[in-house]
Image: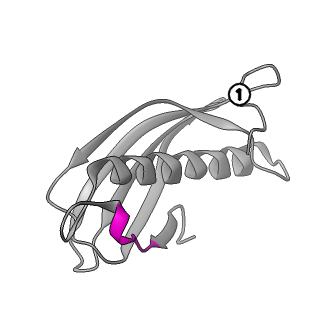
Amino acid sequence: MEGDLVVADWTPEEHHQAFPGVLNGGIIGALLDCHCNWTAAYHLMKAQGAATPPCTVTADYAIVLKRPTPMGRVHLSAKPVDIQGDRVVVEGTLTAENGKVTATCRGTFVAVKEGHPAYHRW
């Protein structure tokens, strides 16, 4: 955590490449979706004063691939930009080891209740 930012570092392996030296766009999308989803869950937990994060799912998200992401450690950061009840809009970035932002994400993540197929699946 860095203020409202939820941060993580991740190092891809060779099988995560789209082609030699470049991280696959689908992997980038999965990384940002998951990181932003957990950011939403964490901030909903804080907003609700709960002891554990709620189960959240992705309602929508969009990824912008700004430039190729070179293989090597990447830095993920995300923050909530709007919290309304059980919904959180989150913006996230993926920064390459060279310090350049290579992808961004904006998505809506929603807490689900018992009976939803994703409820406590992780």
Horizontal placement of 71 versus 36: left or right? left
Q: Position of residue 49 (x, y in %)?
A: 80, 48
Question: What kind of residue is marked 1?
Answer: Val
Which quarter of the rendered picture does the C terminus lie within? top right
Quadrant assignment for the N terminus: bottom right
Q: Secondary structure at mark 1?
A: loop
| Residue 53 appears left or right of 25 | right
- Residue in view at x 50 percent, y 63 percent: 5
In the rendered image, the vertical position of residue 17 relative to residue 74, given as above or below: above
Say if the magenta span includes residue 13. Answer: yes
Q: Residue furthest front?
A: 15
| Snapshot quadrant of residue 110 | top right
Q: Coloured how?
A: one colour
Residue 14 drawn in magenta: yes
Q: Residue furthest left?
A: 67
Q: Which residues are magenta?
A: 10-15
Count of picture labels? 1
Q: Indicate the position of residue 111 as horizontal and vertical percent values.
A: 67, 32
Q: Nearer the viewer, residue 32 or 54?
A: 32
Residue 76 x %, y %: 42, 64
Relative to residue 11, is residue 18 depicted above or below? Answer: above
Residue drawn where x is 42% and y is 51% of the image: 32
Describe residue 68's horizontal placement relative to residue 50 as left or right: left
- Taking 26 as reference, is 53 left or right? right
User: For the point 75% across and 41% down, which residue is it?
Assistant: 54
Name the foreground residue: 95 vs 13. Answer: 13
Residue located farthest toward the top when viewing the structure as drawn: 115
Return the x and y of residue 77 as percentages of the image width and height. Answer: 43, 63
Residue marked by disc 1: 112
Residue 94, relative to residue 115: is it above or below? below
Q: Residues within 10 Å of mark 1 (few under 14, many from 20)?
A: some
**In front: 6, or 96?**
96
